[in-house]
Image (cartoon, rainbow, N blue to C red):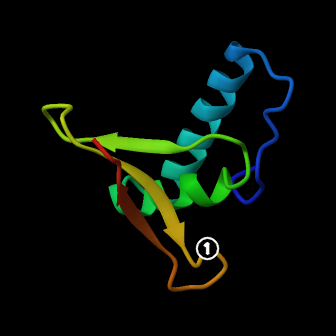
């Protein structure tokens, strides 16, 4: 399951929550709990699923959109893009 993209079209919120939980567990099992590796894996697996992931600072005053640069290359990395205020 970890190497496949998921299809959430037509899922209930509960089904989506379960899929995210399954992906989280599978990602940690396969890639460890390193935050940067987990973010990259999650973003790659959910590419073209129709949603974006945003990250906030501790004060919730600054947000960035997380994207993956060159997702098909071994040099792929998570790129935080600043959100306009």
- Left or right: residue 62 versus residue 54 is left
Res 38 → quadrant: bottom left
- Left or right: residue 72 versus residue 60 is right
Q: Is residue 7 above or below residue 73?
A: above
Q: Residue at x 62, y 60 (%)?
A: 44
Q: Is residue 7 above or below residue 44?
A: above
Res 77 → quadrant: bottom left
Say which residue label 1 marks: 71
Q: Position of residue 55 (x, y in %)?
A: 34, 43
Query: Please, what secondary structure does the residue beneath circle 1 have?
Result: loop
Q: Is residue 44 above or below residue 13?
A: below
Q: Nearer the viewer, residue 25 or 36?
A: 36
Q: Position of residue 52 (x, y in %)?
A: 55, 44
Q: Residue at x 49, y 43 (%)?
A: 53
Using the rendered image of the protein, determine whether residue 60 is visible from the camera's viewpoint. yes
Residue located farthest toward the left when viewing the structure as drawn: 59
- Left or right: residue 61 versus residue 46 is left
Using the rendered image of the protein, determine whether residue 30 is visible from the camera's viewpoint. no
Q: Residue at x 68, y 31 (%)?
A: 19
Q: Position of residue 11 (x, y in %)?
A: 81, 22
Give the tally of numbered discs: 1
CA neighbours of label 1 inside 10 A, class few (<14), some (14 to 19), many (20+)? some
Residue located farthest toward the front when viewing the structure as drawn: 85
Please state, as top left, top right, bottom left or bottom right, where the C terminus lies in the image: top left
Residue located farthest toward the right when viewing the structure as drawn: 10
Q: Residue at x 48, y 50 (%)?
A: 28
Res 9 → quadrant: top right
């Amino acid at each position: 399951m970890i190497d496949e993209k998921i299809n959430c079209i037509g899922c209930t919120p509960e089904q989506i929550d379960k899929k995210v939980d399954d992906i989280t567990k599978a990602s940690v099992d396969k890639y460890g709990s390193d935050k940067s590796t987990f973010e990259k894996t999650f973003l790659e697996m959910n590419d073209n699923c129709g949603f974006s992931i945003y990250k906030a600072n501790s004060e919730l005053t600054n947000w960035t959109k997380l994207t993956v640069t060159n997702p098909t290359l071994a040099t792929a990395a998570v790129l935080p893009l600043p959100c306009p205020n």
